[in-house]
Each structure stands twice: as C-alpha cells, then as structure tokens.
Amino acid sequence: MTMTSFIRKNRARWERLEALLTQYESKAPTQFGRETIRELSSLYRGCTSDLAYAQTYYPNTTLLQFLHQLAGRAHHQIYRSEPFSLTAFTRFFRYDVPEAARANLNYLALAVIIFLTAFALGLTAVSTDPGVAALVVPQPILEDIYAGKLWTQSLFSAMPASVSSALIFTNNISIAFLCFAGGLTCGGYTVLLLLLNGFILGVIFKLCADHNLLWPLFQFVTGHGFVELSVILVAGAAGLVLASALLSPGTYSRLDALNLRGKSAVRLALGCVPPLVAMGIVEGFISPAPSIPAWAKITLGLVLLATYWFYLLISGQRTVDVSRQAR
Amino acid sequence: MFGGKPMSTLNPSFWDDVRTPLSTPEQVDLQLEVANIGSRGLALMIDLSIRYGVFLVLYLLFGIATRFHLFEAEMTMGLKGFALLLIFIVFISEWFYFALFEWLWNGQTPGKRLLNLRVIKVDGSPVGWLEVVLRNFTRPIDSAGPMALVGLAFLFFQPRAQRPGDLAARTIVIRETPIDWKSFFPESKPIAEGQSVIPLLPQEVELLQRYRQRAGALTAPRRAELAATIRATLQPRTRGTYLEQGTLADAEWIEALAQRI
C-alpha cells in the first residue's frame, strides 16, 4: 500500500480517536457511556496496529511521529491510575500508614536512638560548658531563661493563638517532610536534623533545670510535646527508610529498592500531617493557656500519646479480604 | 541533550532529541520524546514565577493591611484571617504546588502545560498520587535553591534525564508535540473521478508534508524559494499529467500535486 492511500484509508479513525481523547483528558472516565469507552479501546488497538505497520513500511515520516503521539496519548487514557476516592483516602490513613510504621520498626528504633543520643549530648554539653547554649539557642530565648522566666510567655502573647498554631504546625510539617527528603542524601540530612533537634532539646532542658524552670517547662510541653516528638521520630524513620534503599538495598538493585521503600517512606511522611496539625492546635490554644490546670494538660498529653502509638502499632490490621480489595 | 542516539532527521526541536522506547501490552514500541534541561528549566522557572508572584501580591496586601492597624493592640478578625490565609498559602504552595497540579492535571503543572511537558511513569502509564508525592517532596534536595545543581547534573548525565526524585518515583518527563492535523495530508476523501494517482515514494510524500507544515511560518520569499526547489525535485515524477506543463505558480503547483497523490 502506498503511504498516501494508507493515510486516506485510516485518517478518519485517527481523527475520531483524537477527538475522543480530547474529551477524555478533561473529564473523569465515569462520565462516559459504555459505548464510547468500547469505541476508545477499539480505536486505540486500531491505532497501535497502524503504528506497527507504519514502523515497518514508512520509517522516518511525519505520519509515524503522529501515530506515536496519538497512541501515546491513548495509552495514557486507557492505562489510567486509580482516581481519588474517599475510600482510597480513608484506606490510606486507616491501613497504609500504620502498616508502613509496623513494617519499619527497626528504622523507627534507630531514629529514637539517634535522637536520644543527641539529647544526652545536649545535657552533658551544657553541664560542662554553659556557653554551648549560645551556639544553638536563639538569643531572646536565652535571655528569658537567664532572667528566670519561660520564653513561651513572651512568644505567645505576641500573636493570636490561631496564628501561632498555624505557624507551629506548618513549620513542624516542613521539618517532617525535610526529614523524609533528607533520606535521598543517604540519610545524612535526616540524621543531622534529628541530631540537631535532640541536641537543642537537651540543652534547653538542662538550662531550664539550672534556672528552676523545669516544672513550668514540663507544664507547657506536656500537652503536645510527647506526640510532636513521636511524629518527628516517625518522619526521621521515613528518611532512614529511604536512605536504607541507597545504603543497603539487599537483593534488589538500588533503584528498585528506592522505589519500593520510597513508597513506604512516603506513607510514613504523609501520615505525619494530621497528628502535627492536631498538635499545632493544642500547642497554640491549650499549652500556653494559664487558665487550664497542669493536671489537665498532663492527662491530655498522655491520652494523646497513647492514642497515637495505639494507632501506629495496633490499629488498622487488615484482614485477608481487605488487602485483596486494596490492590 | 545529545547523549546516545544520533539526532533524528525528523525531530521538530533541536534540543529534545532523546527518545525513549516504551513497550505496550499491544506489542508496539511507542517512542516518546524525553524532555531535557532547556524545557524543564523553563517550566520550573514559570512555575516558580507563578508561586512567588502570588506570594508577593499577598505579602504586599498584608503589609498594607498591617500598616493601618499597626497601633491597635489586638489583631482584628479580618487581619487574623488574612494572616492565616497567608501562612496556609505559603505552606501549601511550598510543599504541594507541584504535587497537587501533577496529580490533578495528569502529570502537568502550569509551566509544564505551557511547554507541552508531562510526567509519566517509566512504564508509560499516568502518574498516581504516590509517584507525584515521591518525586516532588524530594525537591528540597534536588531542585530547590543551590541543590538545583544536583538535579541539573542528573538532567545532564542521566540517559533519561531523571533527577533523584524521578528515579525514586520511577517517573520520566516527556515532551508532547501537539499534532497538527490541518497541514497533514492527504485528506480522507478519495481522489477525484477521472484523475490518475501520481505515485510518490514515502520520502517524497514526506518532503511535501514537511513543506506544508512549515509553509505558514516562513516569509514569502523564503517560501517561494523552497517551493521552487521542491518543484524542481518532484517535476520528473509528474510525467504524463497536466502538472508536467508549467502553467501554475510553484506553491499552487505543490497544492495541486498534494491532491493527486
């Protein structure tokens, strides 16, 4: 067949396919009837066979280029990924996140060890030389502590609780996501973030202890602090999981391991968002409020801590049937 | 990028010449054009301009708003709401701008759409939310600020121009040239009654095809020059038809020929 008669014969089908694709690209597939979907798939198959023919007989032509693009676009529409649905969303937080946490408990433990080591280092560093504090703690906070009052009072009186809690949780989520992304630096950046945060916490605890502020500090952090720290450790674990794919891929190639464990790490990282939003609200509204008694804050903190770890370690165990549906 | 394969004669663009084969379940190899540094950098710049443009406007508005409430002890409700809005918009655009657009627009952001780029999985299927989050949350370490040098190096040396985030998510960025059906010929209607078909080789048809695609964008003298060259090349093929005589102008002669093949 000459190229021109090939085009004359099939062109109408290609144009129809393109018209259908233009519709498909802007709407969800559920908005189309069964007939159009069938038509699309048969036009697509026709297009790929035309493409195969053209590849053999008309190499290096505009025709071939057009057919490649047309088949490529149709391929995108036919082999679509799962669209967003509420079921997929709830499934993610109910099953996928805790499952990813339970599958990576060793990395979580490693994150805890790194953090605690840095915390202990911070404590001892300030005991030996109080000057260390000036290196890692901002000046205004240091001045408040030396003056014998908690910096949170001046910080939280400066702006409304809603604004401060929004600032707190967006900042914390950013840190959590950075912990995750740092995994791609072979974990270097993740470990650095964990060390720095642990170290600063150690320094501040020691400073507050030295200036008789331990009880006010405890009162302030107890409501949100336990869960907030846990979540940052989970985010650190997410980064370490990503790093492990690069450092010890096991029987997989590094790229395969990165893809496989990356998915697990993404689940851990995204799972950090809701608890951090909640803790931001607690930290903005409840923790600095002088009217709420200490025992209430402590109870709240412990209940939240227990809930969070129950969620990660115990809840969301799939039965066999659910996991079948999931994929 | 000029890695690996020789530059295809067909390629409409000069810099995006790396193609990646993709096997479909229908046993046909699709050739897709891998987007390279030039177009991806430009798309990134467009996206960043949009993001920071929005920040700038909001920031100025916020500045003006606070200026007039500067001496009030309490923030008003409106100002408080505005501050919250600002915080959320900055945060969401910081982490979710790329991810949300690529997820909702099937692998495109505004910048990518302008440059006809699209993110797809390495196996050719569209990206899902997991890939999109994985490839975009890793931006701080491969395409933000000074770390962009890392991404740049990968775009240069990785054969399919995948940055670390792309490698982790198994995605590639491809360039889709829109199909120009108007200049593509022949039409689907058969040749008019009583006229014979002038047989041309595929390369000769291709010559006409490319001339017709470019003709609209050329200046008149240049178009006439090209038409004359093409006519000189194809004239011998029209022996025995009315096209052999030289009554028509070059451009019209080519159109008449296009109707007969």
Image (tube, coloured by chain):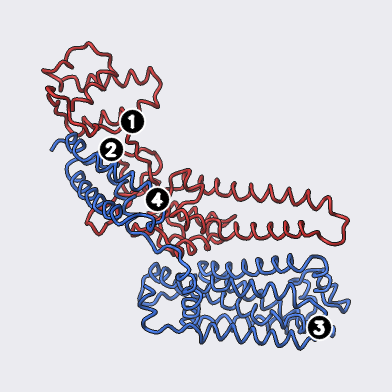
Chain colours: A blue, B red
Q: Quick one: label 3, few (<14), some, or many (20+) residues within 10 Å?
A: few
Decide if residue A20 is on the left or right side of residue A310. left
- Mark 1 or 4: the one toward you: 4
Location of mark 3 (residue): A216
**Cα distance in 3D space between marks 1 and 2:** 10 Å
Quarter holding residue B182: top left
In the rendering, at what x and y percent does residue A41 appear? 27, 54
**Cα distance in 3D space between marks 1 and 4:** 26 Å
Identified by mark 1, the residue type is: Gln
Location of mark 2 (residue): A62
Location of mark 1 (residue): B213
- Marked residue chain, label 3: A
- Marked residue chain, label 1: B
- Marked residue chain, label 4: A
Given contact means CB atoms under 8 Å apart, are the residues at marks 1 and 2 in contact?
yes
Identified by mark 3, the residue type is: Pro
